[in-house]
Amino acid sequence: MYLTKEEEEMLSGKYGEIISSALKVIVKVGESLGAEKLVEIPHAHVSGLSYMTIGDAGLTFLKSFAERGARVRVFSTVNPIGMDMELWKRMGISEEFSKKQKEIVEAILSMGFEPTFTCTPYLIRKPLFREHLAWGESSAIAMANTYYGARTNREGGPLALMSALTGRTYYAGLHLDENRVPTHELILEEGIQLNDPAFAGALGYVVGEKIRNGIPLIKGAKMSFETVKSYTAAAAASGDIALSYIEGITPDYDWAIGEAEHLEKVPIEKREIEKMISLKGDIEVDAIFVGCPHADMDEVLELYSILSKCGKLRIPIWISTSRSTYEKLKELGVIERLESIGAVVIRDTCPVVSPLIASKFKSVAVTSAKGFFYIPKMHGTRAVIIPFRRIGEIACKRRR
């Protein structure tokens, strides 16, 4: 592998043992994948920071870096943790879990990571077209590649940490044009509507199951930022899809069309989408969860518009969002109004990586196909997908 002079010095230990060790890991991974060189990155995003998922072994691993003085070399963000740092008692989190989670946070912050605790790092720093990134978090990776046209592989949390410490990643996989050529074309049945996150997520879920790890191309689909976010998250969950080309959305869609030859046609029927979603009729659930991936401003404001017609909620609604979005909503008075009718807005975490659901609920409704995929697996809790428009119908005690 070709290394620049600075990279050779990093490897030799000139910048310290930690950077040397971290770069050795990246080089070994790159060599195993046939990478000819490393590339600089402006942004790393590290996943796997909830105590629920990494346990004591993960905590020890992170503390070992922090205690040796590790510091990030580039702008570096972090994924959700296992609790809201302020509302953890309200979530039913134990003192022991809270203590361990706070130790993880302390270790991460001591290394210079931004305290973002969100799975939507693209809302913190917008990725640039064709720039190289080293991101963990499958949904964020898929958005970076699909919506912004940036380039990142699906990195595990530890490898993304190594990239944060060195400012480098290996030049292989989706960093190369040759590995970004579409492999399948989705043939959507007429009448499929993708104007709601639930429907777009259901499409992603079906596509992930059918294609697994290919690169789908979608012609003629009318999608928004929110529905692309839901689609990519689900396709990355049920499959291993880190890149899709969506007409009118993906910046290099025209390039992909020019490169594509003999794409495998994958028919998607309307019934495949609709059978995943509770479109009508009564459903009995203990709570509704919104925000997987984290809800952005538009999603929360739309939800607020729906719930403003409610009296008190019949069942609780938990909304997961980022710290930055939470603060903006708080300034607008939206948080206070949502809380007044029985909704709970939490930061820093999400229902997938928190003990919240397993400790409180046996069945939940979600607007996210990614949540539908993970919640039963992680918590043993039944999940059902509902469209955004049904939230008020299901949750409100009465309509004004």
Image: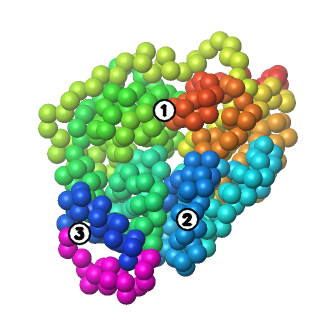
| Element on which disc 3 rests | loop
User: Left or right of 94: which side holds 268?
Assistant: left
Q: Earlier in the sequence, mark 1 or mark 2?
A: 2
Q: In the rendered structure, which amino acid carries the disc numbered 3? A: Lys
Q: Is residue 17 magenta?
A: yes
Residue 391 visible in the displayed image: no
Mark 1 or 3: in front is 3
Residue 323, image x, y percentages: 66, 57
Residue 47, image x, y percentages: 51, 55
Say above or below: 369 vs 11. Answer: above
Q: Is residue 34 magenta?
A: no
Mark 2 or 3: in front is 2
Q: In the rendered structure, which amino acid carries the disc numbered 2? A: Leu
Q: Which mark is residue 37?
A: 3
Q: Earlier in the sequence, mark 1 or mark 3?
A: 3
Residue 58, image x, y percentages: 55, 57
Cα gap from disc 1 to disc 2, whole angstroms: 33 Å
Q: Which mark is residue 217?
A: none
CA neighbours of label 2 inside 10 A, class few (<14), some (14 to 19), many (20+): many
Give the residue at mark 1: 201
Magenta residues span 1-19
Give the residue at mark 2: 62
- What residue sits 26% from the left and 84% below the top? 5
- What residue sits 60% from the left and 44% below the top? 353
Mark 1 or 2: in front is 2
Residue 343, image x, y percentages: 77, 38
- What residue sits 68% from the left and 42% below the top? 355
Front residue of 70/274: it is 70
Cα gap from disc 1 to disc 3, whole angstroms: 36 Å
**Which residue lies most toward the top here?**
281
| Element on which disc 2 rests | helix
